[in-house]
Amino acid sequence: MVSLSSIPYPFFVNDMKKASELTSGMSASVLGWSDDAEVGRFLELGILKGSRIEILRSAPFRGATYVKTEHGNYALREEELAQILISI
């Protein structure tokens, strides 16, 4: 679980969403992660707190979602996207 002290100020709890809720063409700022086990992978991909991510497109049949970060484009599973907490 993400601690509220690790989330940049200002934010409102009602504004916090999961990246899996975004649709193609939407972008958001990363607030943190809901599961600390995957933090290392996200950091390697350039998905850092305060950085922007953009949803490029989603594969059909609940396949991978293509995400653009400041460091490149990546394919993430829906379970991985659900661990990224964002603010639109």
Image (tube, rainbow, N blue to C red):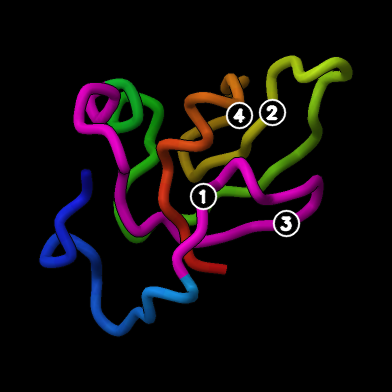
Residue at the farthest right position: 60
Q: Mark 4 sits on what residue?
A: 73
Q: Is residue 11 above or below residue 38?
A: below
Residue visible at 69% across and 27% down in the picture: 65
* Residue 83 located left or right of residue 6: right
> Who comes first in sequence, dot 4 or dot 2?
2
Q: Are marks 3 and 4 in contact (CB under 8 Å)?
A: no
Q: Which mark is residue 66?
A: 2
From mark 3 to mark 4, how far is it between C-alphas? 15 Å
Q: Using the numbered discs, state the Cα–Cα distance from disc 4 to disc 2 in whole angstroms.
A: 7 Å
Location of residue 67 in the rendering, given as x and y in whole percent from the top left corner: 63, 35
The region drawn magenta spans 16-40
| Residue type marked 4 | Asn
Q: Residue at label 1?
A: 18
Q: Quadrant of residue 8?
A: bottom left
Q: Residue at x 45, y 65 (%)?
A: 16
Question: What secondary structure is found at the residue carrying circle 4?
Answer: strand
Residue under label 3:
26
| Residue 8 higher or lower than 17, as above or below | below
Which amino acid type is marked by label 2? Tyr
